[in-house]
Image (cartoon, rainbow, N blue to C red):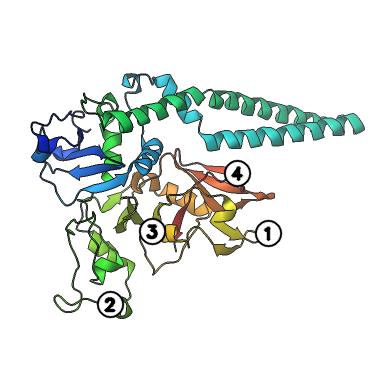
Amino acid sequence: MLPQAAHAFRPSNVRDVIARDVAVVGPGGEVLIYYKDGNDIVVRNCGNGYPIIKKRSDCVMVGQENRVPVAHFKRVLKSEFEFTDADKLKPVTADDVAAYKKADPAKVKQLKQQEKELDAKLARIKKFIEKYGADDKSNKDLADTDKLLAQVRKELTTANSGEAAIKKVNDLIDDLVDKKIAASAITVASYAKSNDQAMYTLLKQYDASKAECGTDEIINGTPVKPATPGGKPAEAFKATMLENLWITPAFAAEITTDQRIKDCSVLSGSSKKTKAGVSWNLVARKRDRATGKFNEVWKDSKSGLLWGDTLDSDYSHYNAVELSATGKVLSEKACASDEGKKASAGIREKSFGLPTIEEFQKAEQDGIREVVPNMYGHWFWSASLYPSNAYFARVFSGYDGYSYSRDDRDDDDLEVRCVGR
């Protein structure tokens, strides 16, 4: 359980007055501060030697600060924030949170599609009965379909009722990022106070003190750019041949996954065992200089598969992968793109592609949502088509770990996570 809440910072001299800072205290007393500076959110790790930080200069950084574009920070915050003590999040209530989760846009689309298909099926059954008369089978089909349709419509009504809650949550996040974090006179932010664990999880994604590891640059000893303009790299290179000798890409040795895991093993939390008893190992962690996000790749020791991070953009299924009419992969699109390569930390010894629904299901059994970041709040395309209709693809929910039957492949608001085989 994480210690107490966010603290307001009250700078005592002019040098500290850039923007007011907010802190989250993590396990072992680790303090992360964050503040808004122009169009960036700045994240700093102050280590664990500061029970209370009164001004920014009190924070002696561990590693480097990280700058994250405000728009990117908000997007991740909206998808990652798991509410706790929801009744304290005025004006958001526990009922609002429940409605918010049920009103997931992708789920609403699925329910609407199911309603459409069941309506059409019901019409066909009625037409058959009208033309040929009823029998036991047609009567049962009619009753079953009518019951399913009623259930879907009930779920849809509940899901649609969350629109007001979605607005409240989005307004709360805008208020936190645009006003409270950037305020000239800030008080304790109840949003952060009531959700230290969720905010801490979010900020750790941007914690530049947690070093990069397992990348080509580190293992082959090629230069690593500073994390911030004018900043000093925490570790410019690791010599792998002769001391202080740069290795050019042309002469770089072929890197193995085991080498990457060994390099990352010095980092705290780089090896985790899930409730199912499956060990997962951090293979690589690399910072995207454009967004400040660290992309992580983890290995499932049971399946041997490598799971990359979530790509930043949303995709239609057609833009994510090219399949034949029988569902054979003809071309990886999203996973082979520059964005896909970034999300896979630039790893080249494995071939990364869109996971099948079976690979998602196996990873869920092995505890992927306990380990891999950026799962909660995301819906992922799989490479598997719906058996009886090639216009629909199977999807995996990062909310609850379920694999859903179908989603229209034209929908362009689902996400992609690539698997290395």
| Residue 69, horizontal then vertical, whole percent | 33, 45
Give the residue at x 61% y 24%: 154
Crowd band around label 1 with a 10 angstrom C-alpha radius: few (<14), some (14–19), many (20+): few
Residue 151, disc? none
Does dot 4 land on a helix, a strand or a loop? strand
Does dot 1 land on a helix, a strand or a loop? loop
Does the residue at mark 2 contact the one at mark 1 (Cβ under 8 Å)? no
Left or right, 12 with reference to 135: left
User: Can you say which quadrant of the picture contains the N terminus?
Assistant: top left
Q: Disc 3 residue type?
A: Lys
Which residue in the structure is indicated by mark 1?
A: 325
Residue 248, disc? 2
Which residue in the structure is indicated by mark 3?
A: 342
Left or right, 16 with reference to 339: left
User: Can you say which quadrant of the picture contains the C terminus?
Assistant: bottom left
Q: How many marks?
A: 4
Q: Disc 1 residue type?
A: Ala
Query: Closer to the N terminus: mark 2 or mark 1?
Result: 2
Task: Report how far apart the C-alphas of labels 3 and 1 lie in the structure.
Answer: 30 Å
Tell me: residue 132, above or below residue 330: above
Asked whether residue 8 appears in the rendered view, the answer is: yes
Q: Nearer the viewer, mark 3 or mark 4?
A: 3
Query: Closer to the N terminus: mark 3 or mark 1?
Result: 1
Crowd band around label 2 with a 10 angstrom C-alpha radius: few (<14), some (14–19), many (20+): few
Tell me: residue 385, above or below residue 40: below
Task: Report how far apart the C-alphas of labels 2 and 1 lie in the structure.
Answer: 44 Å
Q: Nearer the viewer, mark 2 or mark 1?
A: 2
| Residue 64, horizontal then vertical, whole percent | 18, 51
Q: Nearer the viewer, mark 4 or mark 2?
A: 2
Asked whether residue 83 appears in the rendered view, the answer is: no
| Residue 339, horizontal then vertical, whole percent | 43, 57
Which residue in the structure is indicated by mark 4?
A: 407
